[in-house]
Amino acid sequence: MRNIYRFTSLLLTLAFLLVACDGAAPDPAALEATIQAAATGTLGAQLAETLVAQATENAFALAVQATLDASATFAANQTATAQALITPTVTPPPTLAGVGHSGPPDLTLITLAEMNCRFGPATGWAVKQLLPAGQTYPILGRNSDSSWVKIQTGAGECWLAVTSNIDPSGDISLLALAPTPGLPTNTAAPTQAPGLRAGRAIIVDCDGRNFIAVPVESTGGLTFQSGSIAVTRVSDSKQVGYRDSNNLFGASQNSCGGGNASLGPGQLGWVTVLVQTPATEALRIIVTLCTEPGQKGDCYKQAINFNP
């Protein structure tokens, strides 16, 4: 502002000098207009210069602040990225499907017929409970030759013979050995698993009638005293033959419905039954043998197919 005042004073002095030189009195209105124009023009220029300077200063300040803000944001992002790189990510190891522990497998079995579950792994042990057909039980272990398995039932633990009457979910020989109690006094362990072994079925002509004949053998020291044989046609599942008897065991394939009262350990016999179907039909045969008359005691079952 001091410069403005100095400049205005200079203009006034110059005006008076001009008047003095001309020798004529100046027109007051014209002089005031001239001074005002000069002052206004100078002041406007000065003010404009000041405003431009202030605007430039403000713009520079804003630019500096924006740069600082951008730097702070960049620094924060770099810090977060570095922290993410430094902090380890713990990834649990993948679980491979089907890979379990390295020990014995966990197996179950399904009973295909009624079976006696005993206190120990031999027929010399008393029966603990009768297991119904079609039930599933966990297997706890096996004996040394895998001829018996120890299972868990609702009544506790018991031993079940490994025969065709059970359907295990895996290889029994891979199971761990279960603690085996000693046999009862004066009882010898069987050399084979108790049960029956059925051979290939054939059709025999007995006086113009067709009989199914199945060779059977007692295994594991058992003596069978009764049983049954059921025959169904594969094409329509219709039963075409059935026989149960306490004298089921024939001496040959030509027994044609006859038989003896028992089948001893290691003996081979024939089970026969009349069938109401041509010899050209495919058949499903189920043989059941029991250790006591009337289809009681320990009963064992085996299914075979006849294909002409």
Image (cartoon, rainbow, N blue to C red):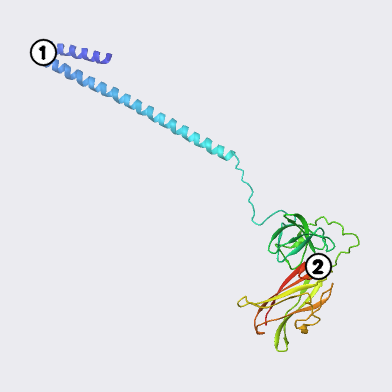
Q: Residues within 10 Å of mark 1 (few under 14, many from 20)?
A: few
Question: The C terminus is located in which quarter?
Answer: bottom right
Residue located beneath label 2 in the image: 194
Callout 1 amino acid: Pro
Question: The N terminus is located in which quarter?
Answer: top left
Closer to the camera, 25 or 193? Answer: 193
As helix, strand or loop, the secondary structure at mark 1 comes to: helix
Vertical relation: 9 (above or below) 83: above
Callout 2 amino acid: Pro
Q: Is residue 280 left or right of residue 218?
A: left
Q: Quadrant of residue 152?
A: bottom right
Q: Residue drawn at (44%, 31%), measured in percent from left and top? A: 69
Q: Is residue 162 left or right of residue 66?
A: right
Q: Residue drawn at (23%, 19%), measured in percent from left and top? A: 43
**Sooner in the amino-acid sequence: mark 2 or mark 1:** 1
Residue located beneath label 1 in the image: 28
Vertical relation: 158 (above or below) 6: below
